[in-house]
Image (cartoon, rainbow, N blue to C red):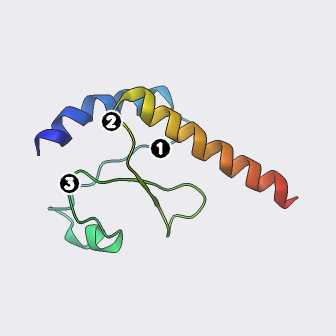
Amino acid sequence: DETCKKIAPRWSKAATALKGMAKFAVLDVEADFLIGQMYTIEKVPTIKVFAGNKYEPIVYSGNLTVRAFMDEAFEQLTKLVNDRLDAH
């Protein structure tokens, strides 16, 4: 998919910048059909954010830029940290 090819370098750059703070992954749902079904991936590309619950990812529909990927990661990390602080 052309969009995936365009996103890949941006995704990789965001992943490198946030190494140790957030994980970025790429799944080939054509090669692993079951994982696509498990996470209800119906079109490519689909970006999902696994924040506090790996069973209920958030669908990301923001801009496809390095900065936007990083901003989303920070937003989700902030929510997770705040939830943990509020729980104690």
Amino acid type for the residue under numbered disc 3: Val
Residue 4 screen position, x and y as percent: 19, 42
Residue 21 visible, this orientation: no
Residue at the farthest right position: 88
Q: Is residue 29 left or right of residue 73?
A: left
Q: Is residue 23 above or below residue 15?
A: below
Which tag is nearer the camera, tag 1 or tag 3?
3
Q: Is residue 8 left or right of residue 51?
A: left
Q: Residues within 10 Å of mark 1 (few under 14, many from 20)?
A: few
Residue matched to label 2: 64
Specify the quadrant of the image occupied by residue 88. Answer: bottom right
Residue matched to label 3: 44
Residue 20 screen position, x and y as percent: 56, 36
Q: Is residue 47 left or right of residue 36?
A: right
Which residue: 27% across, 67% down? 36
Which mark is drawn over residue 5? none
Specify the quadrant of the image occupied by residue 9. Answer: top left
Amino acid type for the residue under numbered disc 1: Lys
Residue matched to label 1: 23
Label 3 sits on a secondary structure element that is loop
Dot 3 or dot 2: first in sequence order is: 3
Dot 1 or dot 3: first in sequence order is: 1
Q: How many marks?
A: 3
Q: CA distance from mark 3 to mark 2?
A: 13 Å
Q: Is residue 62 left or right of residue 70?
A: left
